[in-house]
Amino acid sequence: MRSTWGFRYTMAGVAGWVLVCMGCTQNQPTDIHKLKVPANFDYSTTQDVSVTATVTDADGNVMPGTEVVVGGTGDELVEGNIYTRGITDNQGQFQGMMRIPAWIPELRVQASVFGIANKTDVPITNNAVSVAFGPGS
């Protein structure tokens, strides 16, 4: 019985090795000049994105000095997934610029204010994100 199991393990190992070796040789380009690259591919791994956020309170008054945080979508904005942060100016507006990975399609923008909807996920359009927090937003 012992030799039967040994034979089975040996044959399984050989079969696995053959499959691995066969997989390594298929679908491998042999000439880099034969690669097909889409015309709009620009080899960028990052993108520069401008962010504009306007913050008003529930009555429509501008909110100067309000912290605005911009980061990745999904989980809460915590250190590690925050790309930039800042404070609104006297007109209640925050403007920032950041460089993020090119594969990111949208950002979460959050204003540190109570009484209004204070966070939203915004798609990146033409390397820009714009959001308004407050009534009617």
Image: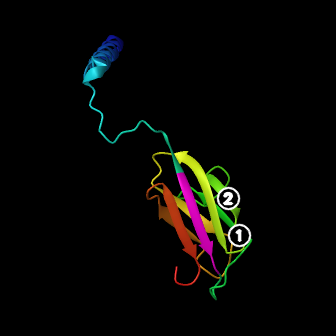
Q: Which residues are magenta?
A: 49-56
Q: Could you tell me the amino acid type at mark 1? A: Asp
Toward the bottom, the furthest residue is 59
Determine whether 39 is above or below 53 in the image.
above
Residue 116, how many percent across, how many down? Answer: 61, 80
**Most foreground residue, 4 or 94:** 94
Query: Quarter-wise, where is residue 33 in the image?
Result: top left
Q: Could you tell me the amino acid type at mark 2? A: Arg
| 3D distance between C-alphas at marks 2 and 1 | 13 Å
The disc placed on residue 89 is 1
- Image position of 14 (left or right of 136): left
Query: Quarter-wise, where is residue 57 in the image?
Result: bottom right
Tag 2 residue: 85
Q: What's the magenta bit mostly, secondary-structure-wise?
A: strand
Query: Quarter-wise, where is residue 77 in the image?
Result: bottom right
Of tags 2 and 1, the one toward the viewer is 1
